[in-house]
Image (tube, coloured by chain):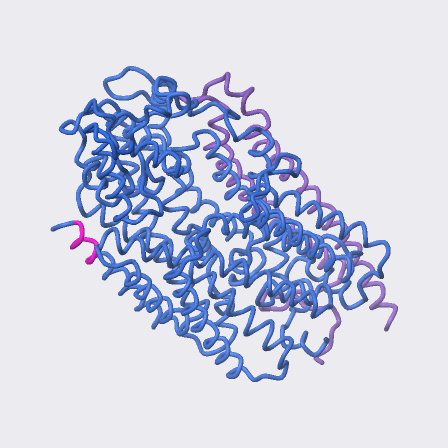
């Protein structure tokens, strides 16, 4: 069976499974729709959180990022896991004790302000929509690469599937499909890693393999990799702070990602669905454990694939090049522009001029064909020929596409075709699980926070449920449109989402829980200045061409500064404004008190307290 | 009647104050370790640590890409275990000072609360 046939099979089976789960977990009330009836067991919730967290980017791109960055890839690894410690210690148990349905709910009630609630809603919706655009696009791309259909077809199918299980089951449907999606994605990720580790180092445990000696070489893999890097002009793989990722920026990006992770609404909301505060703490543990299974393996994949690529490609002639190279060359993710000597040269750094390996990036196939044509003319010595290497290098397209690392690793390791298809199903599971979590946040922000809490507090259960379903259905469609016409800056916008979450939600929630003194206006001003600064800076660097003028920190790490601004403004203004009133003080105390020692919070009662 | 409620309230407030202090200490310790291992060993001291090796990895690189993640998982595990135990201790304290009484179902309710 071809890869395409296997992929159809796996995708068909897994999608069928998601639909069955959707039917089984259909809900009939808002508690089921928004917080899954608060009945999800801690370990299952951990699996769902892990799947929700690991998006198409984590699954496909992260290992590729690590393979390109070497040591600096640790920013993403530490940032995206370290944030869970912050979540577990500073947020999850208290928000679960609070017992409401959304993040803007907490902000609105703690700061007694519909203005604060609306600011939170706007942030949540913006952060979630930007994130979800990349996911639907990711679904389309996996479909196009593995099933050989048009990207948009993939997006339509993805939209249809999510539409069904999200509108039927809301958070309950989403959670249980995420549990299934976790197992699909972790199997798909680990299998090639174990296989390539066995092939290169003889041990099936990738984390040990990464530190081991290469079979038949007698040197440690990392040492050999560093050596090859040095020979070919690339910076050392394991040495920190070489090149543009200096200590300050690595520090800031890591911290921004940690705080941003803890501030992302679609992650926070995952802790509302468990049975108790104690379960929320356990759920955070299970979530990080399940996430760590993938994150601890990604460095191994990154390094193995980097080694296989350098060792397998550099210096080889057309006949010597491995099969995987030829099949992936057709996708444009990896291109060879020979300088005429018949040997492939993959270099970087000081030897970048000799590099012959490129990618097509955003260029269409017609443009690439044209570049090849003129490159061939240049090789033949014709006057109108042009060195394609220079053209591509100036377009910033040197080196293969990062996404190829995870997608091509099974072929690099000569794995069976069904494993390759499994990676496709895994990538889809990752994208769909994250997309559905984000869509739930968008729906709850509009249907619960805007419609119910502000617009129509006397809406009945069935009205609230209907509005929730309509909004999520509408949001899925919009997400699909963003998947078909993606804003060209998706990955930067995701980085923006983290910076925004770090600068807005994280300080507001932490201060809300840990301080009884911080009142409404300081919090609102803090959020607005934090967001304003971060947004202006990032938009300026991305569109306005500003250089990183603020303290030498790039846009990815600027969320740290935004966060500090938020904290400073909030705490600085606090002495000048009144303390929260008695009701809020009691709310804070009840959030801090262990469960079962006081009367339970009831969301419907709190509405009348407004 | 109201003084009894007041006394109970102040005992409860005092117990909560003690609980919160212990909570804050645990959090501070765990977050300190989080910072030292993650931002410290993984970033600030990674170049210094790289001189040493662990299992074939340079040490700073290992902390950044493997060790810190392992430590984070352990930190949350410790947090869940310790805090859940602290919660139970708090309940026992409230019971023994007569702030709450256990219902037969195992849940708690206000001591002396009538069926309102």
Going by the image, does A247 lie left or right of A592?
A: left
Residue A333 image-quadrant placement: top left
- Closest to the observer, A204 or B84: A204
Relative to A416, residue A210 above or below: above
Q: Work out which quarter of the rendered image holds the C terminus of chain A and state it.
A: bottom right
Going by the image, does A522 lie left or right of A507?
A: right
Residue at the image position 23 percent from the left and 58 percent from the top: A149
In the current view of this chain or complex, which residue is farthest to the left? A1
Give coordinates of residue B94: x percent, y percent.
72, 58
Residue A52 covered by magenta stretch: no
Identify the magenta region.
Answer: A3-9
- Closest to the observer, A22 or B114: A22
Residue at the image position 66 percent from the left and 43 percent from the top: A561
Total numbered labels: 0
Give coordinates of residue A223: x percent, y percent.
37, 19
Colour given to chain A in the rendered image: blue
Give coordinates of residue A338: x percent, y percent.
24, 29
Relative to A356, residue A61 above or below: below
- Closest to the observer, B5 or A567: A567
- Closest to the observer, B62 or A93: B62
One can see residue A554 in this view = yes
Residue A339 image-quadrant placement: top left
Residue B47 image-quadrant placement: top right
Relative to A50, residue A106 above or below: below
One can see residue A87 in this view = no
Colour given to chain B in the rendered image: purple
* Magenta stretch, overall SS: helix
Give coordinates of residue A201: x percent, y percent.
28, 25
Going by the image, does A47 lie left or right of A551?
A: left
In the current view of this chain or complex, which residue is farthest to the front? A383
């Amino acid at each position: 069976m071809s890869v395409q046939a296997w992929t159809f099979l796996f995708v068909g089976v897994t999608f069928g499974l998601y639909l069955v789960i959707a039917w089984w977990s259909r809900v009939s009330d808002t508690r089921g729709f928004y917080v899954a009836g608060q009945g999800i067991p801690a370990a299952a919730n951990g699996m769902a959180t892990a799947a929700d967290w690991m998006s198409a980017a984590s699954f496909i791109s992260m290992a590729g990022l690590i393979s390109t960055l070497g040591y600096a890839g640790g920013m993403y690894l530490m940032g995206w896991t370290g944030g869970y410690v912050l979540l577990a210690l500073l947020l999850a148990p208290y928000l679960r004790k609070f017992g409401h349905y959304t993040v803007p709910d907490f902000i609105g009630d703690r700061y007694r302000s519909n203005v604060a609630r609306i600011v939170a809603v706007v942030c949540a919706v913006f952060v979630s929509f930007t994130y979800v655009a990349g996911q639907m696009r990711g679904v389309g791309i996996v479909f196009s690469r593995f099933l050989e259909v048009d990207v948009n077809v993939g997006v339509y199918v993805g939209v249809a599937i999510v539409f069904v299980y999200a509108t039927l089951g809301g958070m309950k449907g989403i959670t249980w499909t995420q549990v299934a999606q976790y197992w699909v994605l972790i199997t798909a990720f680990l299998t090639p890693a174990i296989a390539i580790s066995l092939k290169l180092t003889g041990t099936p445990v990738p984390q040990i393999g990464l530190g081991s000696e290469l079979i038949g070489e007698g040197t440690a893999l990392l040492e050999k990799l560093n050596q090859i890097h040095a020979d070919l002009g690339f910076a050392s793989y394991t040495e920190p702070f070489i090149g543009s990722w200096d200590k300050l920026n690595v520090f800031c990006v890591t911290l921004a990602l940690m705080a941003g992770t803890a501030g992302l609404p679609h992650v926070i909301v995952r802790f509302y669905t468990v049975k108790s505060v104690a379960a929320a703490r356990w759920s955070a543990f299970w979530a990080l454990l399940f996430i760590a299974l993938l994150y601890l393996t990604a460095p191994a994949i990154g390094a193995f694939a980097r080694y296989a690529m350098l060792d397998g490609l550099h210096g080889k002639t057309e006949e010597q090049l491995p099969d995987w190279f030829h099949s992936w060359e057709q996708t444009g993710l990896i291109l060879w522009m020979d300088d005429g000597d018949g040997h492939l040269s993959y270099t970087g750094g000081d030897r970048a001029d000799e590099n012959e390996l490129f990618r097509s990036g955003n260029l269409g196939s017609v443009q690439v064909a044209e570049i090849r044509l003129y490159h061939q003319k240049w090789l033949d010595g014709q006057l109108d020929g042009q060195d394609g290497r220079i053209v591509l290098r100036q377009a910033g397209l040197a080196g293969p596409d990062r996404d190829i690392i995870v997608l091509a690793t099974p072929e690099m390791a000569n794995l069976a075709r069904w494993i390759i298809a499994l990676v496709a199903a895994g990538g889809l599971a990752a994208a769909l699980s994250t997309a559905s979590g984000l869509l739930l946040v968008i729906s709850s922000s509009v249907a619960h926070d805007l419609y119910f809490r502000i617009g129509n507090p006397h809406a009945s259960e069935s009205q609230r449920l209907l509005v929730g379903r309509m909004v999520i259905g509408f949001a899925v469609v919009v997400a699909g449109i963003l998947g078909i016409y993606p804003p060209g800056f998706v990955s930067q916008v995701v980085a923006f989402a983290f910076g925004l979450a770090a600068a807005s939600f994280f300080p507001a929630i932490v201060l809300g829980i840990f301080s009884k003194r911080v009142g409404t206006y300081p919090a609102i001003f803090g959020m607005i200045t934090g967001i304003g600064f971060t947004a202006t800076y990032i938009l300026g660097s991305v569109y306005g061409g500003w250089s990183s003028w603020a303290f030498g920190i790039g846009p990815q790490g600027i969320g740290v500064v935004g966060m500090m601004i938020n904290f400073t403004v909030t705490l600085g203004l606090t002495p000048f404004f009144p303390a929260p009133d008695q009701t809020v003080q009691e709310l804070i105390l009840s959030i801090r008190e262990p469960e079962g020692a006081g009367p339970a919070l009831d969301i419907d009662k709190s509405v009348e307290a407004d | 009647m109201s003084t009894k409620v007041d006394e109970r309230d102040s005992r409860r407030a005092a117990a909560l104050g003690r609980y919160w202090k212990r909570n804050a200490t645990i959090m501070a310790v765990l977050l300190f370790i989080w910072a030292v291992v993650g931002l410290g060993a993984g970033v600030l001291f990674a170049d210094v640590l790289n001189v040493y090796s662990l299992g074939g990895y340079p040490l700073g690189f290992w902390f950044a890409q493997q060790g810190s993640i392992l430590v984070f998982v352990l930190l949350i595990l410790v947090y869940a275990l310790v805090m859940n135990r602290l919660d139970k201790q708090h309940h026992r304290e409230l019971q023994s000072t007569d702030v709450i009484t256990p219902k037969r179902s195992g849940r708690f309710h206000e001591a002396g609360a009538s069926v309102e």
